[in-house]
Amino acid sequence: MPSDVIFLTGATGFLGSHILNQLLAKGHHVKAAIREKKAAQFKQLYQSHQSQLDVVIIDDISTAQFPEALKGVNAVIHTAAPLAYYVTDAEGQLKGAVEGVLNVLRQAEKAGVHKVVVTSTVLTAFTPQYTFTADDWFAITKEEALKTEGVTAYIAAKTLAEKEVWSFADAHPQIDITTINPPYLYGAATKEFASYLAAPSLTLISTLINIYKLLNPKGAYPDQPLYIDVRDAAKAHIGALSSKVAGRKRIIISSPHDTVFADVIKAVNEKRPELKDRLTKTTPPEFPFKKLNYDSKKVEEVCGLKPEDFVPVNDTFIDSIDSLLGLEKQWKAAGHDVQAPQ
């Protein structure tokens, strides 16, 4: 309902900023958890939405107490989580992911909030068979997770965190919990998200780094073709708020479109011919699958998204590139050296 009050974490992120903008466009009142160092800029960017938006200063979502902020809240969307790339501290990654989501859930329960949507990842459902169903889990123990690094540490932390979510859900059946489990997020960045990136950062551009590599003649392609447009991922989170579906709602979601990188590069060359010399010359990889065969009926029932509602594949990739070019222009204007990664 447009009158609902939503508590949102991660509101300055690639995904979170889209969720915030869509919530505001739908007429919701949003209480956004923001780190203090970003609060002033955030308020300035959203000054036209002052009547719909409250800023809640939270620097550590794992330990902060915010009962006052949850008063009058109808639902929580928790997107904040440690970033995936360049993980060197597996223990810190695990602690941040697990304690962050549990702290949000515990406080939501105490405040009487009955609807929570949590951002997870399709990789928590990774198996050697690449089945990615709601019954699948990435096989890892806490002890094994502490020995991991890089993206594996991220997957391990997200897996163990999500398992804690479902243990909490089982113990608190009065709370309607949904997890949204997407693959790589691509697509257009919000102008607000771009504004936070004052200097080049391969970490902060999130999974757009996969697309940024395509703007280097020696750049590598993504390691698999699964993705979802960030705008569709945001819609899925918001759609889940009004779901009446009972029971466990672990939503494995992905773009329903075939992704063939040779075709994507061809489309970019046609739509953006001025980038011909910049685009990767690496041979496009071929994969045994072109998309994820997710449960589209469940996604429609819970999130209200039909396969035909998703952003077309070429639009997603071109919009991603346009956003990255905009960031480059912004960085160069500020005097930074800019080089797309390989």
Image (cartoon, rainbow, N blue to C red):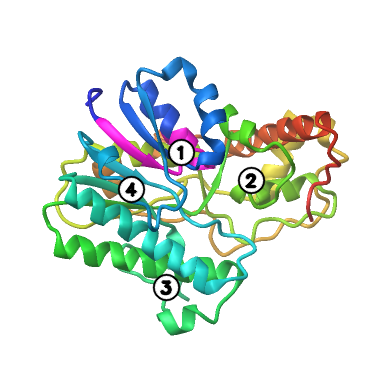
Q: Residue under circle 1?
A: 11
Number of numbered callouts drawn:
4
The CA distance from mark 4 to mark 1 is: 27 Å
**Amino acid at the residue labelled 3:** Phe
The CA distance from mark 3 to mark 4 is: 22 Å
Near mark 1 (Cα within 10 A), the count class, few <14, some 14-19 or many ≥20, is many
Query: Which is closer to the viewer, label 2 or label 3?
Result: 2
Q: Secondary structure at mark 3?
A: loop
* Residue 144 visible (yes or no): yes
Whole-percent x and y of residue 79?
Answer: 42, 48
Q: At 25% across and 52% down in the image, what residue appears?
A: 107
Q: Give whichever of discs 2 and 3 has the lower sequence position.
A: 3
**Amino acid at the residue labelled 4:** Ser
Q: Residue furthest bottom?
A: 143
Q: Quadrant of residue 321?
A: top right
Label 3 near label 1: C-beta < 8 Å?
A: no
Query: Which is closer to the viewer, label 4 or label 2?
Result: 2
The magenta stretch is: 5-19
Whole-percent x and y of residue 82?
Answer: 51, 57
Q: Which mark is residue 296?
A: 4
Foreground of the two, 143 or 130: 143
Residue 319 position (above or below residue 60): above
Q: Which mark is residue 138?
A: 3
Near mark 4 (Cα within 10 A), the count class, few <14, some 14-19 or many ≥20, is some
Q: Residue under circle 2?
A: 205
